[in-house]
Image: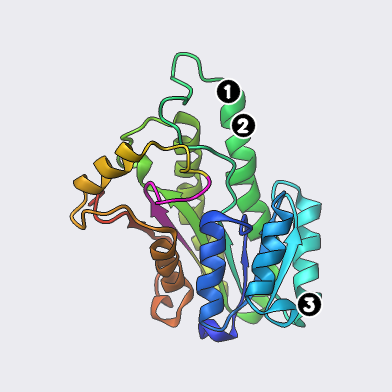
C-alpha cells in the first residue's frame, strides 16, 4: 500500500519526535491521527497544520488505558471512513538528563513500572486494537520507536533502557503472530535527538560529544529519524518484519 493511501496513527504526536513523524507521513499524502495525552493545544494545532479534519485529526487518549485506545480507533474510523492501516508507537514520558537520572543504587521499581505502563503496555494496547482490522484487510504496518541505548548504554538510564529492550522483544515476537495476516512489525531506534522535549534537559556539550563520535559528525534530528519510520511503512519494506533499524548517525554499528 502506498503511503498516500494509508491512515496512520502516531502516539504521543502532539510534540517532539511524534509531531515530526506525523508531518513526514502527511507530506507523503497519508491521513494522520495525532494522538496526545496532555498536549491538547499543540496536537490540535498540528492537525490543523496538516490539513484539518479531512487529512488529520487530534485525538486524546492515554495509551495505557485500553478503553481510551479503543475509543481513539473508533474516532479515527468515523473521521476517515476507514480503519487505521499503520501505527507508530512513539508515546513516551521521560526526560533525558544524565546528571539528574536515578542511579542503580537508588532507582525505585516504580520508575520501571512507569515506563512499562507508558511504553510497553501502551504499545500492546495499540497493537491489539489495531490488529483485527489490519488482518481483515490483509495489510498493516506497526512501527515501534526504540533506542540505541540497549546496544550502547553510554548513559545508564536503567528504567527507560530496560523497557525499550522489552519493546524490541515484543516487536520480534508480535511479527510472528501478525505476519500471516500481512501485518509487519518493526522498530526504529534512535540515539539522542537534537532536539525534542525529552532531550531538552541535555547539556549542549553532550550533544557536541555525541556528534564527534559519529561518522556523520552530527546528532540525528527528529525529522531525519522520521524519514526512517517512513521506510517501514512504505512498499519498499514489504518483505521486512521483526527488524530493528538504528538511526543515530552511525554511532552504533552492530
Q: Earlier in the sequence, mark 2 or mark 3?
A: 3
Q: Residue at x 20, y 46 (%)?
A: 212
Q: Give how far across and how far down residue 132 sits, in percent.
A: 69, 69
Cα distance in 3D space between marks 2 and 3: 34 Å
Task: Assess whether mark 1 and mark 2 are in contact (beta carbons under 8 angstroms).
Answer: yes
Q: Earlier in the sequence, mark 1 or mark 3?
A: 3
> Which disc number belongs to residue 79?
3
- Up/down of 1 relative to 145, above or below: below
Q: Which residue is mark 1?
A: 109
- Asked whether the viewer can see residue 171, the reply is yes
Q: Give how far across and how far down residue 61 sits, in percent.
A: 75, 54
- Seen in the image, is 247 located left or right of residue 169? left
Cα distance in 3D space between marks 2 and 1: 6 Å
Q: Which residue is mark 2?
A: 113
Q: Secondary structure at mark 3?
A: helix
Mark closer to the observer (2, 3): 3
Q: Report the residue that reaches farthest toward the top.
A: 105
Mark closer to the observer (1, 3): 3
Is residue 93 shown in magenta? no
Is residue 187 shown in magenta? yes
Q: Residue at x 55, y 59 (%)?
A: 18
Colour mapping: rainbow
- Seen in the image, is 189 located left or right of residue 83? left
Q: Give how far across and how far down residue 231 sits, in percent.
A: 41, 73
Residue 127 placement: quadrant: bottom right
* Structural crowding at the residue carrying mark 3, measured as other residues with C-alpha within 10 Å and reported as few (<14), some (14–19) or many (≥20): some
Residue 16 placement: quadrant: bottom right
Task: Assess whether mark 3 and mark 2 are in contact (beta carbons under 8 angstroms).
Answer: no
Range of the magenta residues?
Answer: 186-197
Amino acid at each position: 500500500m502506498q503511503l498516500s493511501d494509508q491512515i496512520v496513527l502516531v502516539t504521543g504526536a502532539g510534540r517532539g519526535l511524534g509531531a515530526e513523524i506525523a508531518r513526514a507521513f502527511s507530506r507523503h499524502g497519508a491521513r494522520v491521527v495525532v494522538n496526545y495525552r496532555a498536549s491538547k493545544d499543540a496536537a490540535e494545532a498540528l492537525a490543523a497544520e496538516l490539513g484539518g479534519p479531512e487529512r488529520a485529526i487530534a485525538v486524546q487518549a492515554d495509551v495505557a488505558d485500553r478503553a481510551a485506545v479503543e475509543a481513539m480507533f473508533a474516532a479515527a474510523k468515523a473521521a476517515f471512513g476507514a480503519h487505521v492501516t499503520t501505527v507508530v508507537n512513539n508515546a513516551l514520558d521521560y526526560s533525558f538528563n544524565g546528571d539528574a537520572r536515578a542511579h542503580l543504587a537508588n532507582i525505585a521499581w516504580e520508575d520501571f513500572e512507569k515506563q512499562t505502563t507508558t511504553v510497553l503496555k501502551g504499545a500492546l494496547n495499540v497493537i491489539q486494537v489495531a490488529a483485527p482490522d489490519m488482518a481483515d484487510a490483509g495489510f498493516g504496518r506497526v512501527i515501534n520507536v526504540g533506542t540505541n541505548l540497549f546496544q550502547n548504554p553510554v548513559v545508564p538510564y536503567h528504567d527507560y533502557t530496560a523497557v525499550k529492550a522489552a519493546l524490541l522483544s515484543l516487536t520480534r515476537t508480535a511479527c510472528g503472530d501478525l505476519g500471516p495476516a500481512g501485518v509487519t512489525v518493526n522498530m526504529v531506534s534512535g540515539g539522542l535527538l537534537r532536539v525534542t522535549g525529552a532531550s531538552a534537559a541535555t547539556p549542549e556539550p553532550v550533544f557536541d560529544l555525541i556528534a564527534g563520535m559519529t561518522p556523520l559528525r552530527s546528532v540525528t534530528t527528529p525529522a531525519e529519524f522520521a524519514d526512517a519510520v517512513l521506510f517501514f511503512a512504505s512498499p519498499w519494506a514489504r518483505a521486512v518484519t521483526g527488524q530493528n533499524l538504528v538511526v543515530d548517525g552511525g554511532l552504533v554499528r552492530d
